[in-house]
Amino acid sequence: MGIKKRGKKVNILKKRKKILQRKQKKLGVKEPDLEKKKPQSEKEKKLEIRLKKETKLYWVRALSGALAALIGRLVIGLVGWFLLFWMLGFWFGFPFVTSFLIFRYEYDKEEWNWKHILKPGVGIYFFLFMIVGTFIHTLLLFV
């Protein structure tokens, strides 16, 4: 048996891009520049700003969920109902603190809604609170 030679490496992404470009030329479709496209209307600009704010709030909620569990269980030593009330306090109170005091977001009085502050990151907050809280509780209980 002889030694098998490996074939030439093919970059699949480049091949796929070339094939798509050829197909678009045949069909006469122009390639849209999504990255260069800027929002035309005032409504789209406001939406983009709101989405950036919500993204920041989402990641702050993720971090605050993990930290609330860590501080509540490890530092303060809360268990059971007290830990639940601690979680709910951070869940509903801390987003307003971050939105108004830390980031100092300005909201239009006509469009302001408390749901824009509480809505982003509810699931990740609860998930990380439960994971970190359970992990810390297990470590403290068995170690």
Image (cartoon, grey):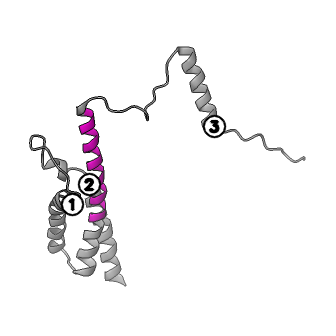
From the top left corner, tell me how far across and down residue 50 is, in percent.
Answer: 24, 44
Residue placed furthest toward the right: 1
- Give the side of residue 138 with respect to residue 81, left or right: right
- Spot the residue most to the bottom: 143
Q: Gap in Å between the C-alphas at discs 2 and 1?
A: 8 Å
Residue 58 is covered by the magenta coloring: yes
Q: Earlier in the sequence, mark 3 or mark 1?
A: 3
Category of crowding for the residue at label 1, using alpha-carbon neighbours closer than 10 angstroms: few (below 14), some (14–19), many (at least 20): some
- Please determine whether, in this image, residue 131 is positioned above or below residue 20: below
Which numbered marker is on residue 35? none
Which residue position is annotated with label 3?
12
The residue positioned 30% from the left and 67% from the top of the image is: 66
The range drawn in magenta is 44-64
Quadrant housing the C terminus: bottom left
The amino acid at mark 3 is Ile
Q: Amino acid at mark 2?
A: Leu
Is residue 64 shown left or right of residue 24? left
Q: Give the residue displayed 84% in from the left and 45% down from the top.
A: 4
Q: Determine which quarter of the picture holds residue 142.
A: bottom left
Q: Amino acid at mark 1?
A: Thr
Residue under circle 1? 98
In this rendered view, identify the residue nearer to me: 25 or 129. Answer: 25
What residue is at 29 percent from the left and 56 percent from the top? 124
Q: Secondary structure at mark 1?
A: helix
CA separation in Å, label 3 and label 2? 38 Å
Q: Are the residues tagged 2 and 1 within 8 Å (C-beta)?
A: yes
Chain-order first, disc 2 or disc 1: 2
For the residue labelled by badge 3, is the local secondary structure a helix, a strand or a loop?
A: helix
Main SS, magenta residues? helix
**Residue wearing tag 2:** 57
Q: Compared to 119, does 80 lie above or below?
A: below
